[in-house]
Image (tube, helix red, strand yellow):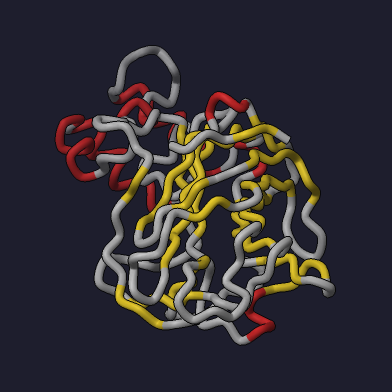
Amino acid sequence: MRTLLRSAAVVSVCLALVGVPTGTARAQDDLPLQNDGLVNNSQAAIQLGFVNGEIGAATFTVQERLFPLKVKKVQILWLSRFGSAPDSLQHSIRIYSGGLPSPSFVDSVDGPILIDGFLNEFDLADYNIWVTPPDQLTVGMQFDDAPAGDPVKPSLVTDTDGCQPGKSPIYAIPLGWRDICSFGASGDLVIRAVVETSAPLYEVGDLNCDGEINGFDIDPFVLAIENAAGYQQQYPDCDVWLADINGDGWINGFDIDPFVDLLIGL
C-alpha cells in the first residue's frame, strides 16, 4: 500500500478534468484506455448502491504484445445529484492483472480525494506500477465513504448507452467479484486509464493505426509515400515512419515490395 496525495440517479454531464497540469501532452507510446461512451452533455447514472469496502472497476483489453504496461494515470468520474458535495476521501485506487471472474491484485495507492462534478485524474507515474500479461488490465477504486443508498451523496458513475459484459467488474460484499451488468446497470463505469506500453503502439506497416496489417493499410501507405504531410494530416495519431518498411530511413518505392510481403504474410 502507498499513500496518494491529492492531485443510480440519472444526470446530464459536462466533463471537466481536475488534477491535470496545464500543457500536459500524451507521449507517443502512452495508450488511453476507455470503455464508457460518455461525452459532454450526455446522461450518466450515479451508482448509489456501493457500501464501504466495495470496489468499482473497469477492465480493459490490450494487445498482448504491448505488455508489460506501466499505469501512468487513472481517471474517475465522481458525481452527486446536485453537484455540491464535499470532497471525498476514499480508500484506494487498485490495479489488477486480468479481469472477471477473479482479477489478480497487483498494487494499490491509498487515499484518493475525489471532487464532485469532475473527471478526477490521478497521476500514478511515480509509483512505478507495472502489469504483466495476459491481455487485460483492471483499474478500480475501493470505497471508504460510500453512498450506501443515500440519494444526495456522490459516487461512481456509469454511462447510459448499454452495459458491456465483463467491462465493469465490481467487488460486492459478500458476493465477491461480479459483473455490474448482472445488477441491471445501464452502462459501463466511467473509470479510465492511461498506460505506457513496452512496445510501439503500432507496428510498421499498420498505416491506418487500427492494430492490424491488412488491405485497409494500402491507401494510407500509398499516401505516405506520395505525400507525407497529407498522410500526417489525415492520420494525425499515426506516424508516417510506419511506411518505412525496409527500415532504411527513407519512405520511397523501395518500401513497396516489403509492404506487399507484410500483407501476404511472408
The location of residue 97, given as percent across then percent down, is: 73, 46
Q: Quadrant of residue 229?
A: top left
Quadrant, the N terminus? top right
Q: Which residue of the protein is positioned furthest toward the front in this rendering?
A: 86
Closer to the camera, 244 or 95? 95
Closer to the camera, 204 or 88? 88
Quadrant, the C terminus? top right
Closer to the camera, 72 or 90? 90
Q: Which residue of the protein is positioned furthest toward the top in this rendering?
A: 248
Vertical placement of residue 77 versus 97, above or below: below
The count of marks equals 0
Q: Quadrant of residue 172?
A: bottom right
Vertical placement of residue 172 versus 60, above or below: below
Please name the residue shown 66% across and 52% down the image.
138
Vertical placement of residue 232 versus 118, above or below: above
The location of residue 224, given as percent across then percent down, is: 25, 34
The location of residue 98, given as percent across then percent down, is: 74, 52
* Left or right position of 45 against 181: left
